[in-house]
Amino acid sequence: MFSITLKLMKKSARMLIPAGIAILIGTAFIAATFLFGNAMNDALAAQNTAQLGGANYVISPDSGKDLTDKDQDYIYTRTVNDFQLDRIRATEGVKDARASYAGSVTVTRGNKHASSYVITTAAKRTLLPVTITQGDQPVDSNEIALTKSVADQLGVKVGDRVTVNSQAAQYAGKTGDSAGNTGDAGDESAQNADGTSSHDGDSDAASGASVSSDGANTADSGMTVRVVGLTDDPNGAYAYYGGASVLSDNVITAMAGSNDFGNLPVYLVYLDIDDASDTAAASTVKQVSTLLPKHFSVQSRAALVEESVKSMSSGETSITTIFLLSFGILAMLVAALVIANTFQVLVAQRRRTLALLRTIGANKSQLYVSVLFEAGVLGLIASALGVGLGIGLMAALCQSGLMKATGMTMRLVLSGPVFTVPMAFGIIMTVIASLGSARSATAVTPLEALRPIELTDTRRAGVVRAVISVLLIVAGVALCAFSVWQMSENIAGRDSMADKQYPLVLLAAIIGCALIFLGLVLSATFWLPVLMRGVGAMVALAGPSAKVAHANIQKNPRRVAATGAALLIGVTLVSTIATGAASAKQTMNEALTTRYSVDMIAAGTDMTGKQASEAAKVKGVQRGIYAPTRMMTMKDADGKSLSVLVVGVDGVDALRKVVRSDLSGVTIDGDSVLMPKYSAATGKDIPLDKSVTFTAGAAEAQADAANGPSGNDANGSAENGNGQSGGTQTLTLKPRKVDYRRIASNYAAVAFVDASHFTNGGIKADGHIMLMRIDAEGAGVALNDVFTNVQNVFSASAGVTVTGPVAERTQWETMINGMMALLVGLIAVAVLIALVGVANTLSLSVIERTRESATLRAIGMTRGQLRRSLAVEALLLSLVSGVVGVVLGTLFGWLGSYMVFSLYGDTVFPFEWATNGVVLGVAALAALLASVAPARRAVKTPPVEALAEA
């Protein structure tokens, strides 16, 4: 019997292809989902441990809840000397050891300046977290290996000499204080998964300024070093900084404002231990541990990676995998429905063959097993091909470098579930989908099998289906409502499960959507034919062909529902993804706009008006204002001190050009100051009295006095014309609060005053700022290009930095567009496969209505009218199901967006007219094409032969 089944499969291969492709797409989706999760875990783990370089062990602080504040203070005040690096390196089995210290410096060559993040060197380049692409790593005094981008910016090659400087070095040079360590001890490990710094301890990292506190340019001072190599950052260890340069020990010591490398504060030491033998490695680790300060221990790289993956498995990565996997399972439902219809067509076409087999001795169980065996073979072959397709798609994604724009380098990571889960799911779903057809093939007598099949539902089956559907929908709505309620409570700041168990709340929403959709699919037999009947009643008015189509589409509600549900799933998926992606982009843009009231800013002590004019001419920069600044301090109504960047502007009208905030009814005059409502440091409301007094910081005042500013004597003790001490500058104004944010995130607040305070000597400017509004889309350029071109304008000024939400928005849009292209690409194929199910349904309808079609032809219906009736039938099936799918997909997309993106800001709920319109257009076109083959079958047989055959 099995051999006969295989021969029947071979004969019906063309009919099996649509079902096989449906299985292939579904299993490919599931395989790709597992691969994507593997790749994300691998990429994030690699990024989180990229700063280890080639180290296989790390000396790090103990992570324990029992550590007191005193213990924490002890840990973060350790120096290089405390780790006894010489004794560690001399320990048997230790190949090399590298103390982790990092900071920012300004690199100068001629009149060109660039900021660079710098790290300590190692005896062997394998221990470095960056790759030396040319030359060698610094090993002797006065050496540096520059990042390739900085070298290109300065026009430097290996062997050239450059000057390096830092604020800490300048401060130490002025005061003679060599203890002014302002670099980030161990900051290499203090980055988040996206490469951003997790704290703001780097005093010179923000600007990389090579200027003294009074604004005088001292970029020509510093330390001259030789460039011995160029570095690259392939693993994104320092993606936020554009890579890292490597300094020899004496240079990084000087840049930290110290005179002894052993005095640099560190709390991480990277080790390269010979681990050829586990016993020997354990012995080495034990010996090293005896040399460490208290509260420090040696941990293996493998343990760190495992800990990193474990921490991510309960976070966003697993949520992403579950989210995508849920779509893969739903895609398999599309395949199951298409498979069910395909096998119904096969059984109908094989009625006479099955009857003949029954006549010559085949029993019902043999036919039943034959159909299931055929389904199993089809599921096995298609699932194997689907897994191969999923692997191929992910390999192509990894090789394309599409994810590099997000700062991640993804690679193909195979695992057991990639193969077992999709294939098992594919085979099981195929067999389950064929059960109904198997029963249909055996539930009739040989004589009845010679007549056309007519599938009907019993009343009991309908009641059971209705009850189950209602229960699923009610449970799904309850879960979704619970998730939305918990998220709203969390957003409102009240106690919520979403605060501590967010993954479970999100999972509840996903399961709720799946249950609602499953309930709708199961109950489609009831509501979808009714919906089509209502639409068809209006379409029937178009003519006899439409009237026949309207009547025929209601002949078999079960099959209409199955076909419509298959298409419904595909369209719902596409609409959900498109809506979610659009919501993500708009929500994140709104969130960034809320967090940053200015698109882009350039700020620094040596910015010139000429540079500002050039920046304003960059394509994509819509408007810009250039203003003087002064860093001052003030106290809020609670008596807390705030660092404030005071900016002088020519009235509020100038500010409206660049600040995205409601400034209506606001004025800036000589007696008022415009203050932000919320602190950029804490995000909390800034309480203010009826007047606020701004005072220049002590360091600035001392510098001004030392330089003898106009109106003051050399020691700064005289008073100027404004009655202010030469060493102190104060300004008392009436505050007006407006909700604008993150103009310059290095300060708790940015205050806008009338520019006259700077011109009349009331405030002495110590820098300038340029605020820019960007319209890249209107200018027809990429956001990233605008950002890069503005940076290039200010490249000649060492103390100028360019920041703003533009770069973040570019990263988000690139990531979302890449994800959307991958998902919609897969699901769009599933939609086309569902449309093949429309062709299968029409084919089965033609077989069932052989006598009816012949009768219609005999009484005068033309071939063209018969073709049109089938085309209208296909359009009704596809468009009604498609419109319902668009509505459901939009609602699911809105729910998903609220659950995910409300964490970042006010969620936007868009309707994707373009994408949904394209989907419905493709569905209509494909439906028309799907009707061609069944129509040819219906019209090619003469009416007399058709009547005789029926």
Image (cartoon, rainbow, N blue to C red):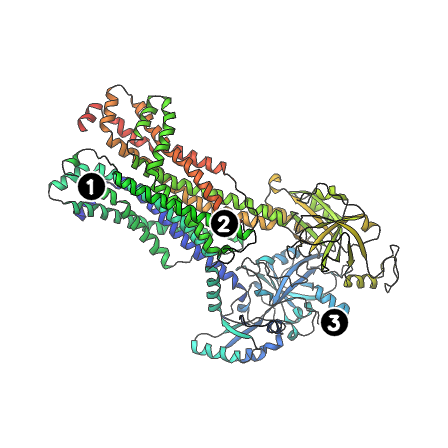
Q: Earlier in the sequence, mark 3 or mark 2?
A: 3
- The alpha-carbon separation of the residues under discs 3 and 1 comes to 93 Å
- The alpha-carbon separation of the residues under discs 3 and 2 comes to 57 Å
Residue marked by disc 3: 177
On the image, the x and y values in percent for residue 801 come to: 68, 54
The front one of 19 and 567 is 567
Tag 3, which secondary structure?
Answer: loop
Q: Earlier in the sequence, mark 2 or mark 1?
A: 1
The front one of 392 and 475 is 475
Q: Is residue 532 left or right of residue 375?
A: right
Which quarter of the rendered picture does the C terminus lie within? top left
The front one of 138 and 793 is 793
Badge 1 amino acid:
Ala
Q: Is residue 836 visible?
A: no
Badge 2 amino acid:
Trp
Image height check: is 787 above or below 708?
Answer: above
Q: Is residue 586 visible?
A: yes
Instruction: Look at discs 3 and 1 and give the one toward the viewer.
Output: 1
On the image, the x and y values in percent for residue 131 come to: 55, 63
Which numbered dot is residue 485? 2
Badge 3 amino acid:
Asp
Q: Is residue 798 left or right of residue 65?
A: right
